[in-house]
Image (tube, grey):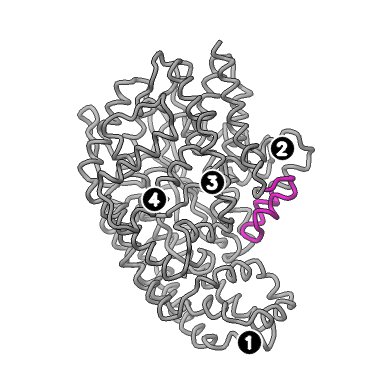
Amino acid sequence: MTLPSSLLFKLPAFQTEAAFATAPSSSEAKSDESLGAMPEWDLSDLYAGPETPELADDLAALERDAGAFQEAYMGQLASHAEESGVKLAESVKAYEGMSDRLGRIGSFAGLLYAADTSDPVRAKFYGDIQEKLTAITTRLLFYPLEFNRIDDAVLEAALKDAVLAHYAPWIEDLRKEKPYQLSDDIEKLFHEKSVTGRGSWNRLFNETMTALRFDVGGEQLSLEPTLNRLLDQDGAKRREGAEALASVFAENQRLFTLITNTLAKDKAISDDWRGFEDVADSRHLANRVERPVVDALVAAVQDAYPRLSHRYYALKARWMGTDKLAHWDRNAPLPEEPQQLIAWAQAENMVLDAYGAFAPQMASIAKDFFDKSWIDAPVREGKSPGAFSHPTVPSAHPYILMNYQGKPRDVMTLAHELGHGVHQVLAAKQGPLMAPTPLTLAETASVFGEMLTFKKLLAQASSPRERKALLAQKVEDMINTVVRQIAFYTFEREVHTARKEGELTSDRLGEIWLDVQGRSLGPAIELKPGYETFWCYIPHFIHSPFYVYAYAFGECLVNSLYAVYENADEGFADKYLDMLAAGGTKHHTELLAPFGLDASDPDFWSMGLKVIEDLITELEGLEA
């Protein structure tokens, strides 16, 4: 069954992984000559290490408790519900408690692995924990399935009890899964085989991508610093980085093609058994967002391509003195962009100042991430590329992974992930079952954090040239978040739809990629030979099919939300923090109502996209 993550624990699908030794404290963190000391996370708030007795004891206790839970409640939920809401609530509380402990163990293993996925010892530990947790959760699988077989009238009567009513949002979400629920035996089979099925293909992708090395100017680089070359001021270095990426992707695309075909077929099998009509319906259900809402977003963005990406890249090409930009120049810094690297301490102050100006509570929560070693910031050999904020469990706290290299975009990434982190801390009071937020709303806090930081930096711009550079960078980030992610979503839709007719070759995947990217980026971007392989490295396609539209959803939502903020009274910050603290207890319509916003209104998306258009218009004015 495609259960929400809050209903049945699953190990996080990280892009890479983490070290066994407990990370050093802030004072011991590695430093870089130009970036200064940077923190590495301390996972001891979860467990002191993989060999700690506490971890072994927790695993053993969970095995016993899961067995006792199964014995006590399997086949009994309907009678408990008929007896009283209190009786049923007791089972939910017990299930919730085990969810927290399962999440703590899984988070520790996943974060440990993310710090260094190339270490075979860490990889084995991660795999072993995955198998043990799958075995334990198999004992619990009956619970959400049997819960959904309780008669509606009986459950409605039981919910009159205040203790059970506390879990009403979780129960409502669970009932939405009911139409797609299969028999217990089939659900058990799907669950147990996930370790050797999708989970193994995800791990193969992670470890392969982490092991790749790219020859850039005679230097062997991993993925993250090679991608960073595309942001270099020197055009020759950007091209060198892009060609190195294309060469290595081409050498490995047969494997990535096999992974993509296998996972697309795996998803199709699951969707067919469950009765999902559209290739993305399972994601919409998990996101608690209706298909027409997503379709309206996609249509609005695609209609706006000429007014957004096509228009901006034509403008940027003129700035760069050419008619067209090669794909490796798409995110090239402008001559006006400051060249100095931003030290870690400076980035910390930038983000905390921006957060504090909006709401002191946000800055206070965010400061804990820096002071208490909740961030792993430096680039390291074998470390997972990219960035994420993992919530772990409400009884602990989130952890943030970054690969900080001192670029202005790295500061925006820090602001983005801290937005997630603050959201996760505020929502933790809802407990393990109701703290998790659908992806579409989870991106709201992160993008809002970026916007706060951008506006702060823009207000501090010391010259028109600096203002132009900041505006251009923000527009590019917005295009990457909206246009690029909707293009990714379109690519996924075409791939998963075409896969129903048979396996796709590497050439066919490349053709789809070039076609979709060409339409989204416009005539001012020239897709040079080699770019047809760049679909290979996008981790969301592997780990979370159709995740990507959540970024565009969040960006457009935040644009509208920020417009309300700029014209709001003093109560806006309190309403915003209340929205984050609600976690997964409310639908997007309830969360946005206090701000006068409605994502189901077709004009809602146009309002968010107009914010980007207006920034491009301002840049055109600065061009004169």
Dot 2 alpha-carbon crowd within 10 angstroms: few under 14, some 14 to 19, many 20 or more: some
Q: Amino acid at mark 2?
A: Tyr
* Cα distance in 3D space between marks 3 and 2: 26 Å
Residue at label 4?
541
Query: Which-is-in-front pick, marks 4 and 2?
Result: 4
Left or right: 126 in relation to 107: left
Q: Is residue 488 above or below residue 615?
A: below
Q: Circles 4 and 1: CB distance less than 8 Å?
A: no
Query: Which-is-in-front pick, marks 3 and 4?
Result: 4
Q: Secondary structure at mark 3?
A: helix
Q: Report the front residue among 228 and 614.
A: 614
The residue drawn where x is 29% and y is 47% is 209
Query: Which-is-in-front pick, marks 4 and 1?
Result: 4
Q: Earlier in the sequence, mark 4 or mark 2?
A: 4
Residue at label 3?
369
The residue drawn where x is 59% and y is 56% is 290
Q: Amino acid at mark 4?
A: Phe
Q: Earlier in the sequence, mark 3 or mark 4?
A: 3
Left or right: 243 in relation to 363: left
Name which quarter of the figure residue 73 lies in.
bottom right
Left or right: 449 in relation to 195: right
The residue segment tinted magenta is 577-598
